[in-house]
Image (tube, rainbow, N blue to C red):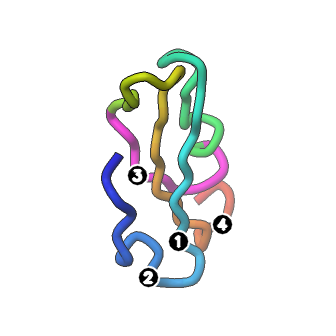
Amino acid sequence: MRQINDAHVAEPGLAVVEVAAADDQTASQEVLATRWVTATADRTTRVPGEPGVRLRCYLDLRQELGT
């Protein structure tokens, strides 16, 4: 995975969430997206020699639910 850039968390309310899961189907950002505005992640990543996958999402926690 690429390093987290300071711009991703430059303001209060911005967050980076990394999800570790067993497989691509389990690694889902849908639950996060229903609660917060999120920049969609288009793919999971794998680390050679390590089990499972990772998915990184960028959240904007400043948005109210339902907006």
Report the disc number at residue 14: 1
Q: Are marks 2 and 1 in contact (CB under 8 Å)?
A: yes
Q: Residue furthest bottom?
A: 11
User: Which element type, helix, strand or loop, lies under badge 4?
Assistant: loop
Residue visible at 40% across and 43% down in the picture: 40
The quadrant the C terminus occupies is bottom right
* Closer mark to the observer between disc 1 and disc 4: 1
Task: Please report whichever mark, 1 or 4, sits nearer to the chain's N-terminal start.
Answer: 1
Q: Amino acid at mark 4?
A: Glu
Q: Which residue is mark 4?
A: 64
Residue visible at 49% across and 84% down in the picture: 11
Q: Give me the C-alpha separation between circle 2 and circle 4.
A: 19 Å
Q: Amino acid at mark 1?
A: Leu
Q: Are marks 3 and 1 in contact (CB under 8 Å)?
A: no
Q: Which residue is mark 2?
A: 10
Q: Give me the C-alpha separation between circle 3 and circle 1.
A: 11 Å
Q: Amino acid at mark 3?
A: Ala
The span picked out in magenta is 34-42
Task: Please report whichever mark, 3 or 1, sits nearer to the chain's N-terminal start.
Answer: 1
Vertical arrangement, residue 7 with respect to residue 48, above or below? below
* Closer mark to the observer between disc 2 and disc 4: 2
Report the disc number at residue 39: 3
